[in-house]
Amino acid sequence: MPEDKSAMEQRIDNAIYGTPKIKPDEQRKYLGTFRERVCLTISVAELQERDWSSAVAKELERGIGNQVFLNGNLPHSKLRNYIKVATSMNANFTLKTDPEFRTNPDSLAVVVAAKSAVYQAPIDVQKRYPESQQQPTTDSPTKKKSLWERIFKGKEE
């Protein structure tokens, strides 16, 4: 097939097949953005382990990246804290719900990116913020005592 297509043939091809994307696999991996714009990533497996919202807040405070891309195919309960952090830091956030964004453990759940190329390394949250790993998870709330337990335990003491 000749490489020199006329403008009309290119327009017809774009109408039939859609506009060709640059690096579609890279965009699929990084929730619709390019690797050179990414500042921080959190995988689905890392998201299941603990809450990394403090690391996202630190990254947004640096002021380099101000866009947060969230994998909208994940449960809202897992993404709630990241949405709160993004809104409190006046960052733009986007929920990506296309079926091409998977929820496998190695897929990305949260991506903090800039509008232009920044070439940050490392971008993995566990490598970038290792001090955040020592903090306990806040997923399990403390059990409150019932009214009867408080009344009868109070009389025994």
Image (cartoon, rainbow, N blue to C red):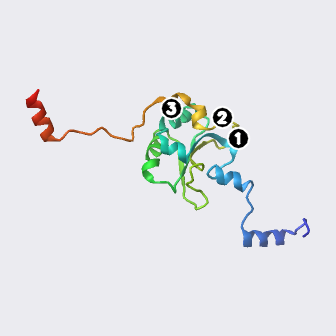
Determine crowd level at label 2: few under 14, some 14-19, many 20+ residues with C-alpha closer than 10 A: some
**Kind of residue indicated by mark 1:** Ala
Q: Which residue shows up at 57% across the image and 53% down it?
A: 104
**How far is the residue under mark 1 from the one under mark 2?**
15 Å
**In the depicted structure, whether residue 67 falls above or below residue 1:** above
**Kind of residue indicated by mark 3:** Gln
Closer to the camera in the image, 138 or 91: 138
Q: Earlier in the sequence, mark 1 or mark 2?
A: 1
Using the rendered image of the protein, determine whether residue 104 is visible from the camera's viewpoint.
yes
Q: Which image quadrant is residue 21 in?
A: bottom right
Image quadrant where one finds the C terminus: top left
Q: Earlier in the sequence, mark 3 or mark 1?
A: 1
**In the depicted structure, whether residue 107 falls above or below residue 61:** below
**Kind of residue indicated by mark 2:** Pro
**How far is the residue under mark 3 from the one under mark 2?**
16 Å
Q: Which residue is mark 3?
A: 133
